[in-house]
Amino acid sequence: MTKPHRKLLIYLPLAALIIALGLPARLVPNLLPTWYVAYAGDVLWAMLLYCVCALLLGRSTPQTLCIALLIACFIEASQLFHPPWLEQLRAIRPLAFVLGFSFLWSDIIAYVLGIVCAALLDLLLLNATNPTSPHQ
């Protein structure tokens, strides 16, 4: 299986766009529609996780999808536990965005949706930058 080359010039701006779209859902939720606050942040967080995995791991798109989904589910499951050391990490605002506070099944659904969308976008971007190379 080939390992597609991930291009920083594509994924860094994409990650910046995802962050710009997702932060308002956490920082100014009262100014946004309820559905956006409830779900968009989680979908975008999962998309960002996929981008980070794609950049750092250099795996195929299906492998990256699986790894990102495992990480997202692990982080969500960690929200079932509240030892003092983990709560101290969650008290740090940037880590709170990553770790979350309470487990929700709807978050898992949002993560699957976000990671699948990011993988599809990944395939489109990779095919656009190198149409002759297989990316599966």
Image (cartoon, helix red, strand yellow):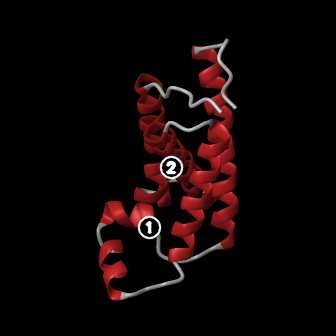
Label 1, secondary structure: give it.
Answer: helix
Q: On residue 49, which mark appears? A: 2
- The reply to whether discs 2 and 1 touch (Cβ–Cβ < 8 Å) is no
Alpha-carbon span between mark 2 and mark 1:
12 Å
- Image quarter hosting the C terminus: top right
Q: Residue at x 63, y 73 (%)?
A: 104
Label 2, secondary structure: give it.
Answer: helix
| Label 1 crowd (10 A; few <14 / some 14-19 / many >=20) | many
> Which amino acid type is marked by label 2?
Leu
Which quarter of the figure has residue 61?
top right
Q: Residue at x 47, y 31 (%)?
A: 11
| Label 2 crowd (10 A; few <14 / some 14-19 / many >=20) | many
Q: Residue at x 49, y 60 (%)?
A: 30
Which quarter of the figure has residue 12?
top left
> Which amino acid type is marked by label 1?
Leu
Image position, residue 74 (x, y; %): 55, 68
- In this rendering, position of residue 90 left or right of residue 47: left
Image: 118 above or below 8: below
Q: Residue at x 60, y 23 (%)?
A: 126
Q: Which residue is mark 1?
A: 99
- In this rendering, position of residue 123 left or right of residue 81: right
